Image (cartoon, helix red, strand yellow):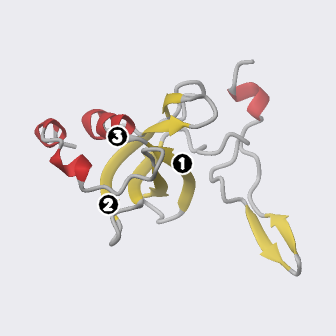
Amino acid sequence: MSSSTAMNAGWLERVKWDDDGLVPVIAQEQATGRVLMFAWMNREALAATVASGEAVYWSRSRGRLWKKGEESGHTQKVSELRLDCDADVVLLAIEQRGGIACHTGRHSCFYRKYEDGDWVVTDPVIKDPEAIYRK
């Protein structure tokens, strides 16, 4: 990430933000290519991600910026950002620190697979969420 790039905000204007000022973001593990999670960013979150090199998202439920791992310690180091052909989806190539991206204590939020008419859990819980998040 380049701080000089972050200062030139023209790149932010090329993103197609939705009516709420958000863009969907996919976090993909750089080493494996596995999709770990989906989230949202607003302009401030995307600019903060570029400036810090760490994933910062917009939490719709909290109504505020959310640095991934701020509570759990499972941060995401961003090595590359990509914008899709329609300029309305951002892809982050990340290193998932701590090995857990999902609030359920799993490596990926995509831990269920459709099989024979049902969703089957395919990935184990690495760490109990009660041990990760303070209440």
What is the x, y in percent for residue 44? 35, 34
Separation (CA) of disc 1 from disc 2: 15 Å
Q: Is residue 109 left or right of residue 116?
A: left
What is the x, y in percent for residue 51? 25, 34
Q: Amino acid at mark 2?
A: Arg
Q: Tag 3's secondary structure? A: helix
Relative depth, front residue between 117 and 10: 10
Q: Residue at x 65, y 45 (%)?
A: 102
Relative depth, front residue between 92 and 130: 92
- Residue 135 picture quarter: top right
What is the x, y in percent for residue 22? 45, 47
In the rendered image, the quadrant that contains the N terminus is top left
What is the x, y in percent for residue 54? 37, 37
Residue sitting at the far top = 135
Q: Is residue 81 above or below residue 126?
A: below
Separation (CA) of disc 3 from disc 1: 14 Å
Separation (CA) of disc 2 from disc 3: 15 Å
- Mark 2 lies on residue: 82
Q: Residues within 10 Å of mark 2 (few under 14, many from 20)?
A: few
For marks 3 and 1, give the one nearer the viewer. 3
Q: Amino acid at mark 1?
A: Ala
- Residue 46 picture quarter: top left
Question: In the drawing, what numbered circle is on residue 30?
Answer: none
- Mark 3 lies on residue: 43
Q: Tag 1's secondary structure? A: strand
Q: Residue at x 39, y 56 (%)?
A: 93
Quick check: marks 1 and 2 in contact, CB under 8 Å? no
Q: Is residue 31 left or right of residue 80?
A: right
Q: Tag 2's secondary structure? A: strand
- Mark 1 lies on residue: 39
Q: Amino acid at mark 3?
A: Arg
